[in-house]
Image (cartoon, helix red, strand yellow):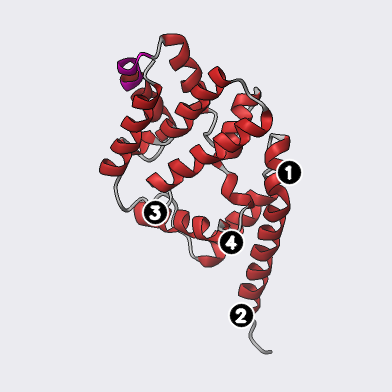
Amino acid sequence: MDFQGAKSFIVDKLRKELDPAYTYHCIGHTLDVHAATLRLVGMEGIPEEEARLMEIAALYHDSGMLVKYVDHETASVGLASRFLPEFGFNKEEITVISGLIMVTRLPQKASSIAEQVICDADLDYLGREDFFIHAFELQHEWNHFGIRKTNLASWLDIQIKFLSEHDYFTKSATLLRSRRKTENLNEIISLWQQKNQKRPSTKTSS
């Protein structure tokens, strides 16, 4: 298989064709997930052959954004199935890659170590210092495309619920990101409390 060719092709296609209004699902996110996948693959000791398929899955996992926003994972599988044979990937390999792409759909339900790594890589930013940057990029994107209209208060509510319910699957991601993720959650809760305190009272005097 032409592993490098398959990687270069999709990265170049995303750079050229992704709507610039995608502030979160941009080429930067794809490359970020790719880097996180490589890091977790090394920490988890995943064999090279399996790791290569995971690397391709990471690069193709949001390629469906070129086609549609909602259910873009299915579109991503369609693009992978269309283009990867041109680089020598066989049906079995594409099936594995497709499964890894689909498991990134929320809510994540990963079973194999490969699935767990991809899921953790996709949400790696939750436990990083740049969390708030990416979180508000996603809010802007949702509002712009009408996916879900939110103001600051409702967005903070969503983030509190999401981070409170989220757990990393792998030991490696837990080790790397859980502590900062908790700190990020606490910061969001603090912002939410400050926001609520500033809301004008609706009570009337008797």
Amino acid identity at mark 4: Leu
Q: Which residue is mark 1?
A: 175
Q: Which residue is mark 2?
A: 198
User: Which label's residue is closer to the chain start, 4 or 2?
Assistant: 4
Q: Secondary structure at mark 2?
A: helix
Quarter of the figure with residue 8: top left
**Marks 4/3: CA distance?**
18 Å
The x, y position of residue 46, in whole percent, is 63, 24
Q: Is residue 64 visible?
A: yes
Q: Is residue 143 left or right of residue 136?
A: left
**Marks 3/1: CA distance?**
28 Å
Residue for point 65% across, 75% down: 194
User: Which label's residue is closer to the chain start, 2 or 3?
Assistant: 3
Magenta highlight: main SS: helix
User: Which label's residue is closer to the chain start, 4 or 3?
Assistant: 3
Q: Which stretch did the figure color magenta?
A: 83-88
Residue for point 73% across, 36% down: 171
Graded by Cα atoms within 10 Å as few (under 14), some (14 to 19) or many (20 or more), the crowding at tag 3 reads some
Amino acid identity at mark 2: Lys
Select label 4 or label 1 by which is in front. 1
Q: Residue 87 lies in magenta, yes or no?
A: yes
Q: In this orientation, which residue lies closer to the viewer: 67 or 134?
A: 134
Select label 4 or label 3 by which is in front. 3
Q: Which residue is mark 3?
A: 23
Find out whether the residues at labels 3 and 1 contact each other: C-beta distance under 8 Å.
no
Q: Secondary structure at mark 1?
A: helix
Q: Is residue 109 visible?
A: no
Q: What is the quadrant of the N terminus in the image? A: top left
Graded by Cα atoms within 10 Å as few (under 14), some (14 to 19) or many (20 or more), the crowding at tag 4 reads many
The x, y position of residue 6, in whole percent, is 36, 25
